[in-house]
Image (cartoon, rainbow, N blue to C red):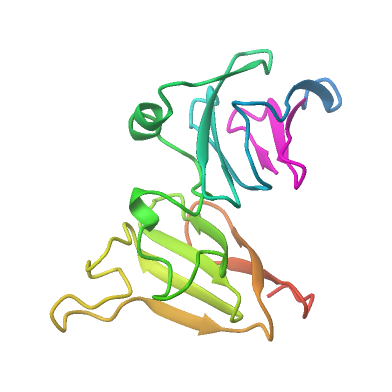
């Protein structure tokens, strides 16, 4: 779930590959639904990001695909056939999609991509946070690129690869950032059902 920055819409994605947009001003009346079709997601939705202008939405699925949607003032949507170019041009409020240029090296080597459960960045976009199946909150400098100082692999014995904090006994399902800074983070555990 993600609210648009202008607070007009709530976007909800689910495991049956549907994306719904609700109007906040009209008591959460559905605006449009992006139903499964040849242009929609092929797997469960696991990431939703709004552009700062609230006129575009990018979504990701468990299959690793990323699609971009143009959103009009009434909550109507169209598939954006220039998605890759739109992603590069737009400024995004959050970064919950797991695949992308700035999150290339968040995955441990030998891992299939399913062990990272949540991704987000702070408002300044200085840090990227991930929650994983090992109960860890991982903190990186943005971008996390292969062989960069922020990435997991050291650059010729360079700086440390990031910070890793273990707090949950099981997987970390969600990360929330309080306000514009990264001074306070909240994590939600899976099996342990804890909010830290």
Q: Which stretch is magenta?
A: 1-22
Residue 66 highlighted magenta (yes or no): no
Above or below 153: residue 22: above
x, y percent for residue 158: 17, 80
User: Seen from this angle, which residue lies furthest front?
Assistant: 38
Q: State whether residue 183 appears in this view.
A: no
x, y percent for residue 38: 62, 26
x, y percent for residue 22: 77, 27
Relative horizontal placement of residue 159, taking residue 49 as reference (left or right): left
Relative horizontal placement of residue 79, taking residue 11 as reference (left or right): left
Image quadrant holding the N terminus, namely top right
User: Seen from this angle, which residue lies furthest left?
Assistant: 156
Q: Residue at (34%, 28%) from the top-left corner?
A: 85
Residue 21 highlighted magenta (yes or no): yes
Out of 195 and 109, give the one closest to the viewer.
Answer: 109
Q: Residue at (42%, 76%) from the top-left corner?
A: 110
Q: Residue at (56%, 67%) from the top-left corner?
A: 184
Relative horizontal placement of residue 160, taking residue 163 as reference (left or right): left
Q: State whether residue 16 appears in this view.
A: yes
Q: Residue at (60%, 52%) from the top-left corner?
A: 62
x, y percent for residue 182: 48, 62
Q: Quadrant of residue 28?
A: top right
Circle count? 0
Above or below 69: residue 101: below
Above or below 163: residue 175: above
């Amino acid at each position: 779930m993600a609210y648009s920055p202008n607070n007009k819409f709530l976007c909800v994605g689910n495991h049956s590959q549907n994306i719904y947009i609700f109007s906040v001003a009209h008591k959460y009346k559905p605006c449009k639904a992006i139903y499964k079709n040849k242009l929609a997601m092929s797997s469960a939705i696991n990431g939703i990001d709004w552009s700062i202008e609230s006129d575009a939405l990018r979504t990701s699925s468990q299959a690793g695909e990323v699609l971009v949607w143009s959103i009009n003032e009434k909550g109507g949507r169209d598939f954006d056939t220039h998605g890759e170019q739109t992603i590069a041009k737009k400024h995004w409020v959050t970064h919950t999609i797991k695949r992308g240029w700035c999150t290339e090296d968040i995955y441990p080597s030998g891992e299939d991509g399913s062990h990272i459960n949540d991704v987000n960045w702070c408002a300044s976009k200085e840090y990227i946070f991930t929650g994983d199946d090992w109960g860890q909150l991982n903190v990186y400098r943005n971008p996390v690129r292969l062989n960069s100082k922020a990435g997991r692999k050291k650059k010729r014995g360079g700086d440390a690869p990031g910070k890793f904090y273990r707090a949950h006994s099981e997987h970390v399902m969600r990360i929330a950032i309080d306000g514009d800074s990264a001074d306070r983070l909240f994590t939600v555990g899976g099996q342990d059902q804890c909010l830290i």
